Image (spheres, rainbow, N blue to C red):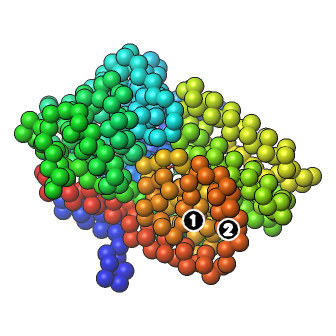
């Protein structure tokens, strides 16, 4: 589809690119989190989608171009629905690609996922002031799990040619293992979270091995150029390798790894369509009735409950806002949708408790007979429900302390076909580089944050529309199909 002179990527154009560039090679995506989990509900088996930015972005790509997605089978009914090769066709309502499940023991999940990945690498890469924990036993299992995934991927490729697209920080060693066994396949990896500067990275005891593992890739992608630069800088100071700053690549033992920024995105058209469905209007009415919102102004936040998302800072700013501008008491309600995440990790549990108690304190301070300032909903929402909340909001607040991209900001913009609603967006997200018409904030600057909430609620309709229109143009053009198409185009040059 063309928009003026600019090409707008969609499912069809991505399909064409995949056909032309990948041909009959197998297309394999690897991530820790699976796009569909099967879970028991009483005697029935239900299929659910997890709250994950990686899944949000990759599922439309796989639906468009088919292929195999290798991931950890973590649903309690996952084993019930796979074939003898641990495969199941998804999505259930219209199968478009193969999900190949890898089984991990409880101990493996504990050490590789909760341990090294999420207590070590996650805080290491986010400047969120949570100390990374590096445990030798976790690292040993992490390595083993990377080998385990490599076996599954190699089995899926068989003797043929293949493109493997690895996702995220759970697989720092996977690409190297794959290339050692099959130098002929092309391997790329997308790092969804930030890459820290070299001073932060050097505290990791296995930093060198991690860097050597990542240099197994033919193409290594980050969200923004700044993370690429941090990566190259880390390589330069840590291991023996040649860096070509012109080509933005690393050469080590004769092998080149290209390092490139590719800002990830969402399926703009799909979200835009769902938002216009009359079912959404019905849903909004229902939510307003159940939450007794009447005709009050509404703010919305949607996050996995994670300390990097700045929810405590957001609640702090709301407190300051009501303190400074009491005329809004009873007239503005903030709804926080928070999907529980990684709750087995101590810092996550503590954060959950802190958020809950903070909400209670703020509500106690300001509530009236029929109104409370913050409503916290911790249940899991389907994509349609989320879009109804986005559409209902006068303001959506994204206040991450550090975030690779943040897809919630882009989803909100894609939902607002009415050109209404204001986005308050943390400067410390990758999205802030593209969405410059949002109201950009520093989530640590509470007074300014509180004033920005007021500004958002008082913004003239004309200015809101102008800002939203511009942001929608950006996301419409830079959608997730373009993201995938560009990466596949780059890979083809290397194959
Ligand atoms: C990483 C990086 C980067 C939320 N609650 C529910 C739900 N969600 C969905 C949202 C959104 C996704 O989860 C979260 O997206 P984020 O971008 O905030 O991502 P992270 O999970 O932190 O992921 C991040 C991303 O990778 C992609 O590269 O943007 O920077 O940290 O899509 O709508 N989804 C469902 N139910 C919920 O209750 N189904």
The extreme top residue here reads: 137
Q: What element carries label 1?
A: strand
Residue at the spot 40% in from the left edge and 64% down from the top edge:
479
Establish if 100 lies above or below 119: below
Residue at the spot 64% in from the left edge and 58% down from the top edge:
448
Residue at the spot 45% in from the left edge and 74% down from the top edge:
473
Distance (Cα) linking label 1 and label 2: 9 Å
Q: 235 or 95: nearer the eye?
A: 235
- Label at residue 455: 2
Q: 130 or 489: nearer the eye?
A: 130
Determine contact: label 1, label 2, CB under 8 Å.
Answer: yes
Q: 382 or 334: nearer the eye?
A: 334
Answer with the quarter of the image where residue 83 lies.
top left
Answer with the quarter of the image where residue 185 lies.
top left
Establish if 162 lies above or below 181: below
Residue 370: horizontal and vertical position, in percent?
Answer: 89, 54
Q: How crowded is mark 1: few (under 14 residues within 10 Å), some or many (20 or more)?
A: many
Horizontal side of residue 80 vs 355, given as left or right: left
Q: Earlier in the sequence, mark 1 or mark 2?
A: 1
Q: What element carries label 2?
A: helix
Horizontal side of residue 278 vs 293, given as left or right: left
- For mark 1, what is the residue? 439
């Amino acid at each position: 589809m063309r928009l003026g002179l600019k090409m707008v990527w969609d499912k069809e154009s991505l399909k064409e690119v995949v056909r032309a560039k990948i041909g009959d090679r197998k297309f394999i995506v690897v991530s820790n989190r699976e796009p569909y989990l099967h879970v028991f509900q009483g005697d029935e088996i239900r299929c659910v989608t997890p709250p994950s930015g990686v899944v949000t972005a990759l599922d439309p790509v796989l639906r468009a171009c088919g292929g195999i997605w290798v991931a950890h089978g973590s649903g309690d009914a996952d084993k019930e629905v796979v074939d003898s090769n641990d495969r199941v066709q998804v999505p259930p309502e219209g199968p478009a690609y193969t999900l190949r499940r890898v089984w991990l023991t409880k101990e493996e999940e504990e050490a590789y996922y909760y341990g090294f990945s999420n207590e070590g690498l996650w805080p290491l890469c986010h400047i969120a002031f949570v100390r990374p924990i590096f445990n030798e036993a976790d690292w040993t299992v992490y390595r083993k799990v990377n080998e385990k995934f490599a076996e599954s991927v190699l089995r899926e490729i068989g003797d043929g040619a293949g493109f493997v697209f690895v996702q995220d920080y759970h697989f720092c060693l996977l690409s190297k293992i794959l290339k050692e066994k099959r130098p002929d396949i092309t391997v790329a990896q997308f790092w969804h979270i930030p890459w820290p500067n070299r001073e932060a990275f050097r505290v990791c005891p296995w930093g060198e091995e991690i860097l050597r593992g990542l240099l197994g890739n033919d193409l290594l992608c980050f969200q923004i150029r700044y993370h690429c630069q941090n990566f190259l800088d880390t390589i330069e100071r840590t291991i023996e390798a040649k860096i070509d700053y012109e080509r933005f690549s690393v050469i080590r033992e004769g092998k080149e790894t290209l390092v490139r920024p590719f800002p990830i995105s969402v399926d703009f058209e799909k979200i835009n369509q769902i938002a216009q469905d009359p079912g959404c209007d019905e849903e909004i009415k229902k939510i307003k009735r159940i939450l007794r919102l009447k005709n009050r102004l509404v703010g919305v936040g949607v996050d996995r409950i994670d300390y990097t998302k700045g929810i405590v800072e957001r609640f702090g700013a709301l407190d300051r806002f009501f303190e400074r501008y009491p005329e809004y008491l009873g007239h503005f309600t903030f709804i926080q949708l928070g999907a529980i995440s990684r709750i087995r990790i101590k810092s996550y549990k503590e954060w959950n408790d802190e958020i809950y108690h903070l909400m209670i304190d703020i509500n106690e301070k300001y509530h009236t007979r029929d109104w409370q300032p913050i409503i916290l909903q911790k249940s899991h929402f389907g994509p349609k429900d989320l879009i109804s909340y986005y559409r209902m909001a006068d303001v959506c607040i994204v206040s991450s302390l550090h975030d690779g991209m943040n897809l919630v900001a882009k989803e909100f913009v894609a939902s607002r076909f009415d050109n209404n609603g204001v986005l308050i967006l943390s400067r410390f997200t990758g999205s802030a580089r593209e969405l410059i018409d949002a109201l950009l904030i520093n989530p640590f600057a509470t007074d300014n944050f509180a004033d920005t909430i007021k500004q958002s609620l008082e913004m003239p309709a004309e200015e809101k529309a102008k800002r939203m229109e511009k942001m929608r143009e950006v996301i419409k053009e830079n959608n997730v199909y373009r993201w995938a198409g560009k990466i596949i185009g780059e890979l083809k040059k290397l194959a």
